[in-house]
Image: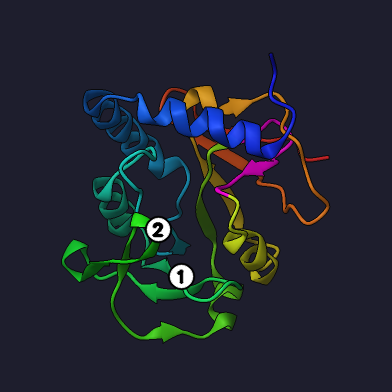
Amino acid sequence: MTPQTKAQWRQIALAARDAVSEHTRNTETAALITHIRSVIVDGSTVCAYVPTRTEPGSTDLLDAVAEIAQRVLLPITGEPGPLSWVQYSGTDGLRPAKYGIREPVGPVLPPETLSDVECMLIPALAVDLRGTRLGRGAGFYDRTLGSVGPQTRLVAIVRDSELVETLPADDHDIPMGWALTPGGGLTRLQGD
């Protein structure tokens, strides 16, 4: 049976992620690192995130991004609303935070910083061929993506099996332009 609601999709995606072995996660991270140069322009400003245990990637992927980009900005969570951002200074500058994630420590950057970002690497449980992104449901990215400039490349990072034909979409969903998967590399999404 095909899931019909976002909640059903989330339940299935989270269960599948829990079943991924450490060996598979390490192999996926290595593959994502080989693909990252096709995503990021040398010397650019990139928004990224610290992957959780079940998300594709690792801090090794984050360090690979930092080797290419001039600046890497990572989100910090607070009250419901748009995400705040702090410049990444290496894994030693990360601390445990809400939702079982790690966040950077440092000065919080003003919201207008996002207008100059060339690429935003975005976590997703799944993304469809139209660019509809399925997040965890808290809405942090939905409230943030409206602040990025039109030049910003929005890239959802998912496993190959999480790039699906279609997902349920809401009016407030901002479509991703690209998906990055371990097996397929960078894939252009169609949009509406």
Count the marks. 2
Q: Is residue 70 visible?
A: yes
Residue 157: horizontal and vertical position, in percent?
48, 41
Label 1 crowd bin: few (<14), some (14–19), many (20+), radius 10 Å: some
Q: Is residue 188 visible?
A: no
**Label 2 close to label 1 by CB (< 8 Å):** yes
Question: Which amino acid type is shown beneath numbered disc 2?
Answer: Tyr
Mark 2 or mark 1: name the one nearer the start of the chain. 1
Give the left or right position of residue 65, taking residue 39 as reference. left
Question: Which disc number belongs to residue 53?
Answer: none
- Helix, strand or loop under label 1: loop
- Write down the quadrant of residue 34 in the picture: top left
Residue 99: horizontal and vertical position, in percent?
40, 58
Q: Is residue 152 above or below residue 86?
A: above
Which residues are the magenta region?
127-136
Residue at 35 percent across and 86 percent down: it is: 107
The question of residue 160 being in magenta is answered with no
Which quadrant is the N terminus positioned in?
A: top right
Residue 183: horizontal and vertical position, in percent?
43, 22
Q: Which residue is mark 2?
A: 99
Q: Residue furthest left?
A: 92
Give the left or right position of residue 52, taking residue 172 as reference. left
The question of residue 133 being in magenta is answered with yes
Residue at 49 percent across and 24 percent down: it is: 160
Between circles 2 and 1, the one closer to the viewer is 2
Question: Which disc number belongs to residue 77?
Answer: 1
Residue at 53 percent across and 43 percent down: it is: 124
Q: Is residue 66 above or below residue 76?
A: above
- Write down the quadrant of residue 82 in the picture: bottom right
Which of 81 and 47 lies nearest the eye of the viewer?
81
